[in-house]
Image (cartoon, helix red, strand yellow):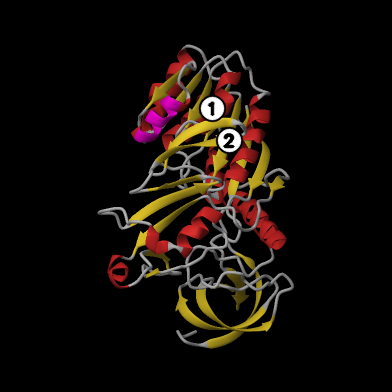
Amino acid sequence: MAIGDVFKIKLENIASGGEAFGRLSGKPVFIQGGAPDETVLCRTIEERKTWIKADLLEIIEASRVRVDSVCAFYGKCGGCNLQHIEYNAQLEIKASILRNSFLRIGGFNPPAFQIFPSPPFGYRNRMQFHCLREQAKEENQKFGLKEQKSEKIIAVTDCPVADKGIRKLLQEAGKLPLPPEKDRFTVFSCNELFLSEGGVETGKIKLLGKEVFFDVRVFFQSNIVMLEKLILELQKIAADADLSLPMADFYCGVGTFAVFLGEMFSKAVLAEENKKAISLARENLKGKNVEFFALRDNVWQETIIKKASAHQKFGFAVVDPPRTGLNGKLAAALAREGPPLLAYVSCNAAALARDSKILTNGGYKLKELKFFDFYPQTAHIETLAVFVK
């Protein structure tokens, strides 16, 4: 098949990145904007030995789960890629992606899992924007979001998935001064709290009745409604551990989980390579029996896990790594010497499946899997996996 060839295809489902896929003579074809069980006309834009990418030209027979998108920038902005699919169908699609990741990468069938839905719109409390300095000289719009599959920045004047404070900001974009010498900046909005890089950067948010101090320049979860649901589940899980032993919080960020879990245990050990985040964690856990390690994750097995194994082992640990998943040395050390109960918070199904294979080969059993839909209208998947020795 040549670039530019036009063909008809029946789409099957949605792949992990959010593209719809079908098969042409057995070869997978990936199409942005397609939906499950849909017949479309498309044009080839790229072909490799094992796959084809194509542009959607026409919907011949629409999927029963296709809906009209509510955002004027959908299809141009690179943020959302499932807004043309009904929300309950999105949940089913992402559950299927998660299950298939375990089968394909982990090599085993995961247990049946519970799904925690989110409000489909208005949920996003934290967003990053890109500066439009040249346009800002002539126009009111000073910042925007990346265009789909492009480095180009488009000025957006609304975002239906965003918190009402961020939506107001977009509608009054000229009122926010751009941070100096930064091409990308973060804002956070929840209830009356509004933080932005270059403006007010630190503040406190109330989670389940407790205040957590954080800085907009440091990672913090983007969906507060779902974060509270996740914390409640972690508390239930941790209650089954030996509470007389210490707990560990790896990739602890500003210490959010330890604020709620740490006081359940005799002691909490927190590890995080971002020194700014650790300083905020110290503030959030002031007066508690906590030990902090501001070190890179490739040395945690030596400085924390081996030390605990030689003295007093952990009764419970929670890990919340970045999209790349656990550091290889850390995953191997947890498999060998980890606590009897381990909670793994993941934002990447493929990395979770890979790490689950390491952990289960090392003596853990995957007891529970819970899917939290932190990012409706996108293909991103947040998961809580519970492992027991």
Examine the rendering and report whether any part of residue 327 can be seen.
Answer: no
Helix, strand or loop for disc 1:
helix
| Quadrant of the drawing holding the C terminus | top right
Left/right of residue 81 with respect to residue 306 in the rendered view: right
Mark 1: which amino acid? Val
Most common secondary structure along the magenta stretch: helix
Disc 1 or 2, which lies upstream in sequence?
Answer: 2
- Determine the CA span between mark 1 and mark 2: 10 Å
**Is residue 138 shown above or below 197?**
below
Answer with the quarter of the image where residue 39 lies. bottom right
**Is residue 252 shown above or below 219?**
above
Q: Which residue is mark 2?
A: 207
**Is residue 221 shown above or below 100?**
above
What residue is at 63 percent from the left and 70 percent from the top? Answer: 84
Answer with the quarter of the image where residue 357 lies. top right
Rendering coords of residue 238 (x, y %): 63, 26
Q: Which residues are magenta?
A: 276-283
Rendering coords of residue 382 (x, y %): 58, 47
Q: Which residue is mark 1?
A: 259
Q: Nearer the viewer, residue 102 or 162?
A: 162
Rendering coords of residue 182 (x, y %): 29, 54
Q: Nearer the viewer, residue 61 or 182?
A: 182
